[in-house]
Amino acid sequence: MNEPRDTTANTPDSADELRPLSALVDGELSDAERSALLERLGHDPAAAARVAHYRSQNTALRRLFPLAGETASLFVQRRTPWWQLGAAIAGGLALGLMLAITLPAQLLPGGFGQPAFAQRADLAYAVYAPERRHPVEVTVREEAHLLSWLSARLKRAVTAPSLGEYGYALVGGRLLPGESGPAAQFMYQNSTGKRLTLYISPYSSREISLRLLHNGASRTAYWANHGMGYALSGTDNEPRLRAIAADACTALGGDAGAWSG
Amino acid sequence: MSFESDLLVWLPHLRRYARALTRDPAWADDLVQDTLERALSKWRWGRGGNLRAWLLTLLRHRFIDQLRSRREVAFDDEEAPWQQQPAATGEVDGLLLRDVERALYRLPLEQREVLLLIALEELSYQEAAKVLKVPVGTVMSRLSRARERMRILLTEPAADATPGRPPLKVVKHSP
């Protein structure tokens, strides 16, 4: 790497004189060194100005790069989980903790009788739907890859139904840790930027007719059949969400006609 | 507290450092994700020491590996991702953040990383030496050069003028 020697040649001060100024700014001097240096700065306006400039640089750098709270878009898996049950468990742990620090507390306990996948879908909506930079891991531009990847991870064919009839276009999708393995989330968006997600996860406990989960501004409509749980989350009103869910269910090979309202 | 929750404590810091280092949010996110994956796979129960320094070390190794694969990265390259980012606005003590940002990316990488570790992440010299795997004395001299270079770039307009030739490219030697 090239060192800009030319600039140090321009400065009268030797490196040995400058280093303590930095150490003062960083609190790396002993008390004795510190007092001696402060004493010296009283008679050396140029050095005092340097210290002030260095401090301003620090403040400016911290202002330039604020600590962001938007950690929820990261999803990590252990790569060598030989002593764990599976990569998804670790991923789930990490994501769960992220959710725990990201989401309002009232979302976490959940209601009685709701399957975990519906709650996870609801949480995942709350985390990813507002995400501006990384709403999805793989965008619809690579739709074929997206579907084959998610199908491979969920170990069954996963498709993203068309919701164009409701004004929603597919944005892309991501892999998430589900209750008992990987889960998929597809993200849709309409022309006003409103988002809808479809969460798909293995769920073999029982079949569930359409039900609703309501948290704050968003709703999640969920159902389960053929060993899979599905959850649609969005801010549409209830009748519309039910209608979208019925269409999605049919498109995904389920029998929405069996739902008794 | 579990290892995962300790990791999460440092996640925003890792992310900030990666962004500052690369000036490219997408690259930074890749780096952080890679770092966390590595951390999760390499970590063993009973591993002591400074978790944050270790994470930063992992991140830095990934960064340097990737920098090599994106060889010849010139920091005033118009194609470079940070040229596509909107410039910072605002000022601190009379320093325009936009100028501070520009000066930062004109530093040679080894100066920039030490400056960010200490001025931004507030590591001690000892910790920075550990992350960078260099003696504390080297940390001090690089840091001092970095700050002085920043000061010159920010106070002497001539130092920033680049008529005809870009003087401060960060050029990695091809292997």
Image (cartoon, coloured by chain):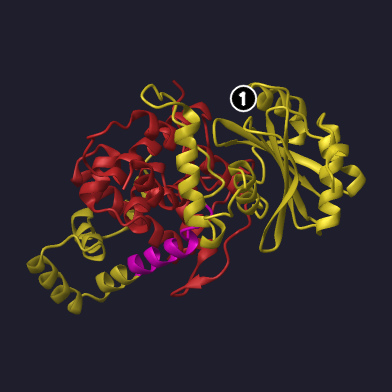
Chain colours: A yellow, B red
**Residue type pointed to by label 1:** Arg
Looking at the rendering, in which quadrant would you find the N terminus of chain A?
A: top left
**What residue is drawn where x is 30% and y is 39%?**
B54
Q: How many marks?
A: 1
Few, some or many residues within 10 Å of mark 1 (<14, 14–19, 20+): some
Q: Main secondary structure of the magenta part?
A: helix
Q: Is residue B118 above or below residue A163?
A: below
Q: Which residues are magenta?
A: A53-70
Q: Is residue B45 above or below residue B51?
A: above
Let me know if residue B164 appears in the view. no
Q: Which residue is mark 1?
A: A153
Residue B43: x and y, percent? 32, 32
SS for dot 1: helix
Residue A37: x and y, percent? 15, 70
Residue B91: x and y, percent? 51, 71
Residue A41 in the figure: left or right of residue A179: left
**What residue is drawn where x is 88% and y is 38%?**
A257
Q: Is residue B172 above or below residue A44?
A: above
Near-viewer residue (B172 or A193)? A193
Residue A233 in the figure: left or right of residue B128: right
